[in-house]
Image (spheres, grey):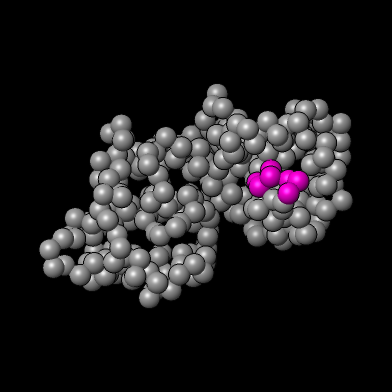
Amino acid sequence: MPLYLLYKDFVRFLQALGGKADPWECYQRHYLQAHQDFLFAYWHHFRWMDLEQISQRVKRVRRGDYCCLETPPGGRPPEQIAQETLKRCQQIATATTEPEVYLFVGFFSADAFVMPLKGKPVIGVGLERFNDFSSLGIILAHEYCHWLRHCKIGDRPPTLGNKLLSEGLAAVFSQLAFPNRPLHKYLFLSPERVSWCRQNLRLLLGLVQPEVESCRLTDLFFKEGNSEIPPRTGNYLGYRLVMEYVKRSGRQTIGDLISTENIRDLLKEITGVRR
């Protein structure tokens, strides 16, 4: 299975720092030049920084901030966890090809994501935000589901319904890959936020149902929230929609649902959803 360990060259860059070494030159020599196809595609995809901003950030790098990359907590390097996770994922559902997974170090990266590279979707995992790798398995399983869905049905319009379905499927998929963890771990929410969502499920459903085919409330449910709705409540709601549909229909596995294109089918069957 293609697993690219870009972060190891970032560690070589860290080890080359010190004395009169120019950080930007070291970064280019040990890391950027070797992996420019991926890194430039990543920077272009997210439009976060240009090369000048990156060079300034590189000059502020401190080796101690990345100690878990040189000495992984628990002695398990991220590639070992990634390999085990991908095996679990493939036991649940597969595509006609295997995913390319890039373990790298960016600056201010998302923990993990799917993006296009040379005409196909790949999975990137930004390791700079990990203090340990205890959550890496769930995060990678989540992104594997996004990758698999993209392979099966391609890009979908960024409607609220598509986002709910995509995130709900990914949360359920990661729960199947790593069962018996607290629910909030699969949803990337605090326990308190999950409790709020449970208590206000009717409110959330009432807001969602007339808007599933629009984009008007996508940011409300998956980003900033507002004075009444906390941020990222869509993670919980998407999970509940998928779980309730699976329980009530009894007809489809998660592998079947990954190819589902219309969330209205799910909504019809769960209008009586319980808290």
Q: Is residue 224 above or below residue 275?
A: below
Residue 30, can we see it? yes
Which residue is located at x 49 percent, y 34 percent? Answer: 88
Residue nearer the viewer, 75 or 205:
205
Predominant secondary structure, magenta span: loop
Asked whether 94 falls inside the magenta stretch, the response is no
Q: Is residue 92 above or below residue 221?
A: above
User: How many marks on residues?
Assistant: 0
Q: Which residues are magenta?
A: 227-234
Kindly give the residue lying farthest to the left in the view shown: 19
Q: Is residue 46 above or below residue 161?
A: below
Kindly give the residue lying farthest to the bottom in the view shown: 52
Horizontal side of residue 1 vs 96, given as left or right: left
> In the picture, residue 174 is in which quadrant?
top right
Which residue is located at x 75 percent, y 38 percent? Answer: 241
Q: Is residue 182 above or below residue 254?
A: above
Horizontal side of residue 55 vs 213, given as left or right: left
Residue 248, position in %: x, y? Answer: 79, 28
Residue 257, can we see it? no
Residue nearer the viewer, 250 or 72:
72
Give the quadrant of the C terminus.
top right
Residue 234, position in %: x, y? Answer: 70, 45
Which residue is located at x 70 percent, y 59 percent? Answer: 158
Kindly give the residue lying farthest to the front in the view shown: 227
Residue 56, position in %: x, y? Answer: 34, 70
Horizontal side of residue 119 vs 150, given as left or right: left
Residue 166, position in %: x, y? Answer: 66, 48
Which residue is located at x 44 percent, y 51 percent? Answer: 125
